[in-house]
Amino acid sequence: MGKKKKKCVLGPMTGKERRKKAYHLRKDTARLHRELSLVDHQCNGDEFLFSNKIANFSKALPHNSLGEVDLKAYQSFMKALKSGDPDDFEAIPLGGNTKLANPQAAFAYDLIGADCHQLGLPVPPAFSSAWEAGEMAEVYWRALTRDVPFEDYDTNPLTIEAASELSGFSDFRGPKDNGTVTTCTLFRGDTPGDLEGPFISQFLWKDIPFGATTITQRYRTALAGSDHMTEYEEWLNIQNGGNPASSTSDPTPRYIRNGRDLGEYVHHDFSYQCLLSVCLILTHYGKEALSPNNPYLKSANQGGFVTFGGPHILDLVTKVTRIALEAAWFQKFCVHRRLRPEEFGGRVHNHVTGAANYPIHQELLHSQAISKVFSQYGTYLLPISYPEGCPTHPAYPAGHACIAGAGVTVLKAFFNEAFVIPNPVTASQDGDSLVPYQGSTLTLGGELNKLASNIALGRDTAGLHWRSDGIEGIKFGEAVALQVLRDYRKTYNENFHGFTLTKFDGTKIHID
């Protein structure tokens, strides 16, 4: 007779009990999402208002000499989005070699968080609105001031003029001081901490502990004045999906010191790069930087690792970024199809030169921003940082913003927002070094908020996005992350009392 097998598995449940609880946990979570109210997705109506589709994204499709999309190609694009049939997507005609950026991602499903079609966004500005005019003027001014060091904003004539003119727009929604855009609020975000201290978050300057080495945050950037798509034929070629011109990089890597450097960072970064970097920096700060809710802070004989430790936080902060992109891609392709600023720049140029007649708001047409662009470049096109221009997916919401909003929300859930950043720094004017920052106290929460704005609005500085793409994008990413955190809240064995964090609008919430 063989020896009787001994039971080796320890735990409070039998295998059958564990399987049953796991099933009900997943079923109950799915039921909660099923019972959410359906979202009534609204757009700004421009696609119905303009039969020539001048207010909608169409890059990479074929266009006429005015940069207006071939309507048969656009209808093919719309047919595919309506049917979701992979064969219909393969039938969309292109104008050149550049492909559309993954429109079928709008129909993906995920197994955690809310379904990507069940989160809403506010309606973006309409093509002819004063709001749109203010946003476009800001993008022009960002292009004109790309090479101004952030440290010089208070004294540089261009940034002083930019702040003054933007203050005069009737519906400009950037941050203000007593109703006025100042050089201290210029081009910044509107979350708690955005207006404190240097323009750039400490987390884009601090060294990154990376295993057995350390990464210094000096990055490849472009030479001053390296702007693209300022000539009409180049602009039209890019709209049709043609091959871009070459670009020359600065041979010296720099700390981020101006808008061009920030634009290049968000040009070459991989999806969750900044969030991975920040997570490594924060875990290096030790237990004082952890959220007071972390169940292991008061344990006498245990430390967090697989749960409430590095692997746990790294997993969630990266996991939520793709889920946020799924939700963003649905909004981009299936709801809004908002045109990019580079496309709008073509509308401005053709209208002002008399080649076409478009209903562009007079506040923009009479602005110093477009006059200065014409004086410098000889066209009214928006100068773009990247030779290829914007990606081939619609503007609203910004993908970088959604990634940053989602990842930062997870980081705020796991770390102590009140933790004071030690030894703050700022970049020298040439970006060759970091120097001590002597101003106000900078907190972890404030610098995380600022990081989200830097990543989101840095794409505006490059000419790729509108302010509302970024501002609403980070809040949209936050909404995605909150749903994921709720799903995971009940999966832990520890005596854990839930996640507490401050939202981008300044309200504190608790996920119990």
Image: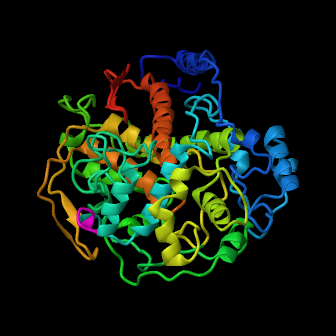
Residue 163 in the image, given as x and y percentages of width and height: 34, 56
Classify 398 as above or below 228.
Answer: above
Q: Residue at x 49, y 67 (%)?
A: 371
Main SS, magenta residues: loop
Residue 462 is at least partly visible in this image: no
Q: Nearer the viewer, residue 293 or 429?
A: 429
Q: Specify whether 88 is left or right of 271.
A: right
Quarter of the image holding residue 126? top right
- Please check the rendered image and state whether residue 155 is part of the magenta-colored stretch, yes or no: yes
Q: Nearer the viewer, residue 185 or 502?
A: 185
Give the quarter of the figure containing the N terminus.
top right
Q: Nearer the viewer, residue 354 or 374?
A: 354
Give the quarter of the figure containing the C terminus.
top left
Residue 289 in the image, given as x and y percentages of width and height: 22, 42
Q: Specify whether 423 is left or right of 17.
A: left
Q: Specify whether 286 is left or right of 125.
A: left
- Looking at the rendered structure, the number of numbered marks drawn on it comes to 0
- Please check the rendered image and state whether residue 361 is part of the magenta-colored stretch, yes or no: no
Q: Residue at x 69, y 76 (%)?
A: 233
Q: Residue at x 69, y 44 (%)?
A: 333
Residue 298 in the image, given as x and y percentages of width and height: 19, 28
Residue 111 in the image, given as x and y percentages of width and height: 61, 32
| Residue range corresponding to the magenta coloring | 152-156
Classify 43 as above or below 346.
Answer: above
Residue 69 is at least partly visible in this image: yes
